[in-house]
Amino acid sequence: MIFSLLTPPSAHEVHVWQWDLDDCSGEFDRYWEILSTQERERADKFRFERHRRRFVAGRGELRRLLSRYLGLTPKEVALDYGSDGKPFCTIQPPECNICFNLSHSESAAALAISNGFEVGIDVEKVRPIEEGMPLEVFSVQERAQFTALPDRERQEVFFESWARKEACLKALGTGFILPPTHFEFDLSIRGDTTPRFVGGEAEEARHWRICALSSSPTSTSSCAGAVAARRTDWSIVEMN
Ligand SMILES: CC(C)(COP(=O)(O)OP(=O)(O)OC[C@H]1O[C@@H](n2cnc3c(N)ncnc32)[C@H](O)[C@@H]1OP(=O)(O)O)[C@@H](O)C(=O)NCCC(=O)NCCS
């Protein structure tokens, strides 16, 4: 089955879709049908049924949405993986280079779709900060800014910063093979921003743009989210 086609993003847009993985449980059998053998094997390795169902709802909806951009059936969507595990589409329509990135945190899922440039997305449920986490995530300068914040602001700033850093590392395709300190931010800037340094370089940082994601309309608890790309002339189009 082919769902209605979607117009790919322009060179200045990133389409963002958000959904709740637990709301899709009625679709489980239909999602399962469209997964690849490899995806089904991965699903079956989850210890807890809830996590297995969420993985299936994430990959199933990913396939459905990609199929509408690519003009294929969801099952025909062909995925391969970069050396550090970033998935990409191997079959593209002519003149198109659909890039995507998926993120989930508990039941929240978000998908970024771009055309012609790599993109990264991260959503994080805002939750208590574990002891020692800021030390691992922040550079010396960021840590100084973080510890100077009033207690009431720390949790939100922490997860906003984390989402920015992880979105950037996912745009690169390395994930946490690089340390979170590879991207350094000015923590006093909330919302859309540019890193201060990338790998210690201010010049490289000027090529990046990070946009804050507004919480999903279906989300029942607070989420921090960010979309990142190594170019500056784009903005988010919220698709739902
Ligand atoms: C990429 C990474 C940050 C994602 O962490 P996470 O907590 O699962 O975060 P998210 O929910 O935001 O992202 C998951 C999605 O990111 C995508 N993804 C996986 N690896 C990725 C990478 N290297 N770069 C960008 N995106 C990636 C996948 O679509 C994945 O969805 P899936 O679970 O359906 O496969 C983490 O897996 C990581 O640091 N990996 C490092 C690379 C690595 O260990 N590779 C080993 C496999 S070769």
Image: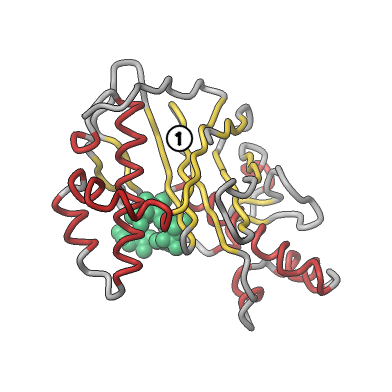
Figure quadrant of the N terminus: top left
Q: Nearer the viewer, residue 64 or 227?
A: 64
Q: Residue at x 50, y 53 (%)?
A: 169
Check the image and name the residue furthest to the left: 37
One can see residue 175 in this view = no
Q: Amino acid at mark 1?
A: Ile
One can see residue 178 in this view = yes
**In the rendered image of this protein, does residue 45 appear above or below residue 236?**
below
Name which quarter of the figure residue 160 lies in: bottom right
- The x, y position of residue 12, in whole percent, is 57, 24
Check the image and name the residue furthest to the bottom: 131
**In the rendered image of this protein, does residue 14 appear above or below residue 192?**
above
Name which quarter of the figure residue 148 lies in: bottom right
Crowd class of label 1 (few under 14; some 14 to 19; many from 20; radius 10 Å): many
Classify mark 1: helix, strand or loop: strand
Q: Nearer the viewer, residue 41 or 20?
A: 20
Image-based side of 79 in relation to 149, left or right:
left
Image-based side of 51 in relation to 153, left or right:
left
Q: Residue at x 51, y 47 (%)?
A: 121
Q: Where is mark 1, residue-wise? A: 113
- The x, y position of residue 175, in whole percent, is 44, 57
Image quarter for ligand 1 equals bottom left
Q: Nearer the viewer, residue 7 or 1?
A: 1
- The x, y position of residue 165, in whole percent, is 58, 56
